[in-house]
Amino acid sequence: MLRHAVALDYPTRPVRIIVGFAAGGSADIVARLTGQWLSERVGQQFIIENQTGAGTNIATEAVVNSPPDGYTLLLITAANFINATLYEKLKFNFIRDITPVAGLSREPAVMVVHSSVPANTVPQFIAYAKANPGKINFASGGIGAPSHVFGELFEMLTGLSMVHVPYRGAGPALTGLLGNQVQVYFSPLSAAIEYVKTGKLRALAVTTATRRKRWPIFRR
């Protein structure tokens, strides 16, 4: 997202797009596709920088502290809005300091499990997790990330007791899931879909009110 100033001859030099998550996740993919599209059309480089940590707060603070000249952009995700209510004291005011300029994508999350988990449905997973309290690790893209909130809400609704393991984005979280360091992850759909299609991970549900028509394997 852009901080204020716009000029008729903008941009005249490379532009940075700051991403608060590690490379390989959905936010990073969106940023790189957008940067490539913009670079091809305006004739200037849009450079992607991954500044991870603190659930995107480090990246946001870096953009807030940059000159408000339009040459440092922030890729905003739901984590930014969550952080505005999760943290009592931040070194910035998200609503005041960041100005949105464009909506880029909208996608659900998908509940995926490691292939060793003996569950093909959500009820089966709940039964398995209840039979193994404290032994199921769930991944997130960081404390306060949407995947963290999804996992905590899932625990509240089901009465499960799982161990939260925060990573620095969807890419590292999926790597942990593939390596069975964690057993379940509420992943952005775009980040997990290829692993599901190739059978490396198993999808149990999507976070939408209806099934995904294009992917009938995803259950409600």
Image (tube, rainbow, N blue to C red):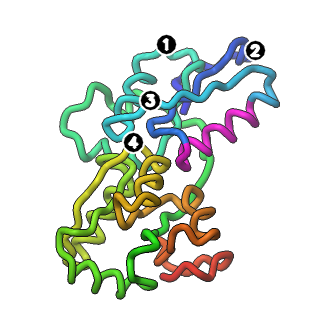
Q: Which percent across, then down, holds residue 141?
A: 39, 49
Q: Secondary structure at mark 3?
A: loop
Determine whether label 2 and label 1 are within 8 Å by CB: no
The residue drawn where x is 53% and y is 39% is: 23
The image's mark for residue 51 is: 3
Magenta-tinted stretch? 24-38
Q: Earlier in the sequence, mark 2 or mark 3?
A: 2
- The quarter holding residue 28 reads top right
**Which residue type does callout 2 highlight?**
Asp
Q: Amino acid at mark 3?
A: Gln
- Amino acid type of the residue tagged 1 in the rendering: Pro
Q: Residue at x 30, y 71 (%)?
A: 154
Q: Earlier in the sequence, mark 4 or mark 2?
A: 2
Which residue does the numbered mark 4 point to in the structure image? Answer: 168
Image quarter of residue 152: bottom left
Q: Which mark is residue 9?
A: 2
Q: Earlier in the sequence, mark 4 or mark 3?
A: 3
Return the x and y of residue 201 as percentages of the image width and height.
Answer: 51, 69
Q: Is residue 81 visible?
A: no
Q: Earlier in the sequence, mark 2 or mark 1?
A: 2
The residue under label 1 is 67
Pick whichever of labels 3 and 1 is earlier in the sequence. 3
Q: Nearer the viewer, mark 2 or mark 3?
A: 3
Q: Secondary structure at mark 4?
A: loop
Q: Residues within 10 Å of mark 4 (few under 14, many from 20)?
A: many
Q: CA distance from mark 1 to mark 4?
A: 26 Å
Q: Is residue 116 above or below residue 106?
A: below
